[in-house]
Amino acid sequence: MKIFRLTANCKKGDRWANFEVDQKLVTKETAHYKNIDEAKGAPLIQQLFYLPFVKSVRLSETMIEVERFDILEWEDVLEEVKEQLQTYLNNGGVVLEAQRNDKIPVSVYAESTPNPSVMKFVANKSLVPHSVEFKNIDEAKNAPLAQKLFHLPYVKEVFLDANYVSITKFEITEWEEVVMEVREFIRAFIEEGNVIFTEAPVALDVDKNDQSELNLNATEQQIVSILDEYIKPAVASDGGNIVFDSYDAQEKEVHVILQGACSGCPSSTFTLKNGIETMLKEMMPGKVANVVAVNG
């Protein structure tokens, strides 16, 4: 009989706690469950949602990550949750119910973006829990889909978010010559049940939007909130992402990082000045004078 041992870790004030298991729980890519209904077929995750403070759960090979609501601090319940998980596993509790081998039909369609070098490929299922960008094949060592895409000679960069893949190409070819090949490759890869990641994807270091609010002052929090609510949905629809980097209070200058289709896009300067900068100036009068892309 297997004996499971867990180690619990959480930084003070963080919403997420990590419960690392000393052996494999699952063999598939990371899954992110946001409520008990999404956890159908995952009895272990359903057990966690019976706890009133559990907001969402991520499950990977040897890790259970639990996000809490703000009704309590992890230090009050961390050891209790660890013991509950350990007891459940050591009593033979089921992690995931057996899955049927029937292939679930997958559809992928290609969508052009304002950046002529970038094409967005949208699937009918979720691919990743948060945005991840790869500038080269070395960065994609734990991402089989991205790795295989880099084997195509015209693929320059790969960006994944939610249910889509944005691919930046080199100038050696035109999208009309290869778009069907790439679309079918991505569709087949997903439909065959291949993992997107062999390890849980790590949010980019530059993504301060997921950091504890304790790390940002009031002005920076307001900037992040505006970007999240008003800007990100628009750029995501074009296959890109925008991430807050820093704020210079003395110069009243906001620094952002452009990802996916936004990076290197000919219209990005116009978007920054006439879209993002104008909105921040209007919503934060006297606090923002300029918006600059640090990678633009």
Image (cartoon, rainbow, N blue to C red):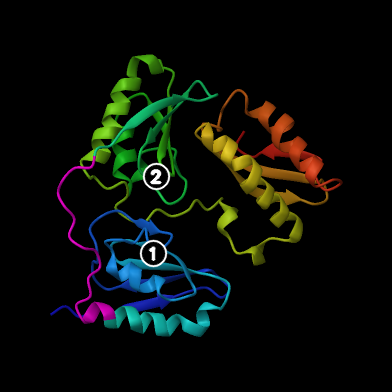
Dividing the picture into quadrants, the one containing residue 289 is top right
- The spot of residue 294 in percent (x, y) is 64, 40
Can residue 5 be seen in this snapshot?
Answer: no
Dividing the picture into quadrants, the one containing residue 272 is top right
Which quadrant would the C terminus be assigned to in this image? Answer: top right
- Point 21% across, 63% down: residue: 97
Q: Nearer the viewer, mark 1 or mark 2?
A: 1
- The spot of residue 6 in percent (x, y) is 32, 78
Can residue 227 be seen in this snapshot?
Answer: yes
First to last magenta residue range: 88-104
- Point 28% across, 64% down: residue: 42
Dividing the picture into quadrants, the one containing residue 137 is top left
| Vertical arrangement, residue 241 with respect to residue 270, above or below | below
Q: How crowded is mark 1: few (under 14 residues within 10 Å), some or many (20 or more)?
A: some
**Residue denoted by label 2:** 139
**184 part of magenta stretch:** no
**99 part of magenta stretch:** yes
Q: Pick whichever of labels 1 and 2 is earlier in the sequence.
A: 1
Question: Any mark on residue 200, and which?
Answer: none
- The spot of residue 189 in percent (x, y) is 25, 37
Kind of residue at badge 1: Ile
